[in-house]
């Protein structure tokens, strides 16, 4: 992805660059990421929505974020947390799903339901740490069987 963004960000710098982008030209920059047609459609539509509906500013609420094409709860949680320090929920990806189920924190398989389960047990001030914790654990055990008896999540649940 870093190789893609390196070239993409040279060509498309401002919001207006994305708003005025031609889909067939834009696709060339993200082709290698897969699903490039859908991504192009969503990225360019998102740029238009941000410009027209939010005066060119990234929204600050979950409701506004998920109204943007291509933005779901995971992306919204990451953006709100990283840009504004707002933790309304937990960015649930495959790693959070896997760890949450292995640790017995949820029995659900659906990301929205897992997020709901985790929000009930993780203090609000620690919500933003869950995704980072899961990512860090993933880095250490990527290709090894997970040994749940060696993990402790009590530090984020207190």
Image (cartoon, helix red, strand yellow):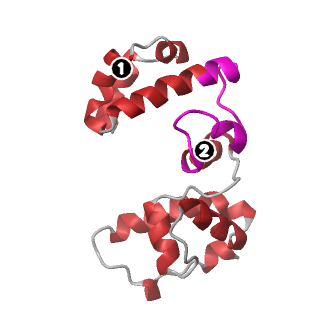
The answer to which quarter of the image holds residue 79 is: top right
Residue 102 lies, in percent from the top left, at 47, 79
How crowded is the residue under tag 1: few (<14 C-alpha within 10 Å), some, or many (20+)?
many
Marks 1 and 2, how far apart in space?
23 Å
Q: Is residue 109 magenta?
A: no
Q: Nearer the viewer, residue 57 or 23?
A: 23
Quadrant holding the N terminus = top left
Residue 73 lies, in percent from the top left, at 59, 49
User: Residue visible at 37% across and 16% down?
Assistant: 11
Residue 99 appears left or right of 88: left
For marks 1 and 2 on the same chain, the one whose residue lies earlier in the sequence: 1
User: Residue visible at 62% across and 24% down?
Assistant: 50
Residue 119 lies, in percent from the top left, at 68, 66
Relative vertical location of residue 85 with respect to residue 21 in this rendering, above or below:
below
Task: Identify residue for label 2.
Answer: 76
Relative vertical location of residue 39 with respect to residue 108 in this rendering, above or below:
above
Task: Identify residue for label 1.
Answer: 26
Q: Nearer the viewer, residue 22 or 143?
A: 22
Residue 24 appears left or right of 120: left
Residue 62 appears left or right of 40: right
Residue 158 lies, in percent from the top left, at 70, 76
Relative vertical location of residue 94 with respect to residue 104 in this rendering, above or below:
above
Q: Where are the magenta residues, as a range? A: 49-74
Helix, strand or loop status at disc 2: helix
User: Residue visible at 61% across and 65% down?
Assistant: 113
The answer to which quarter of the image holds residue 23 is: top left
Tally the numbered discs.
2
């Amino acid at each position: 992805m870093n190789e893609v963004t390196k070239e993409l960000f040279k060509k498309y710098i401002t919001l207006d660059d994305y708003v005025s982008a031609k889909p067939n030209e834009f696709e060339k920059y993200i082709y290698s990421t897969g699903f490039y047609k859908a991504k192009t459609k969503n990225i360019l539509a998102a740029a238009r929505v941000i410009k027209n509906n939010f005066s060119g500013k990234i929204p600050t609420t979950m409701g506004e974020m998920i109204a943007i094409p291509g933005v779901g709860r995971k992306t919204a949680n990451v953006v709100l947390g990283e840009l504004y320090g707002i933790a309304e929920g937990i960015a649930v990806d495959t790693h959070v799903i896997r760890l949450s189920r292995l640790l017995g924190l949820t029995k659900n398989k659906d990301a929205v339901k897992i997020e709901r389960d985790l929000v009930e047990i993780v203090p609000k001030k620690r919500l933003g740490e869950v995704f980072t914790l899961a990512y860090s654990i993933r880095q250490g055990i990527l290709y090894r069987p997970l040994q749940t008896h060696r993990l402790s999540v009590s530090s984020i649940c207190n």
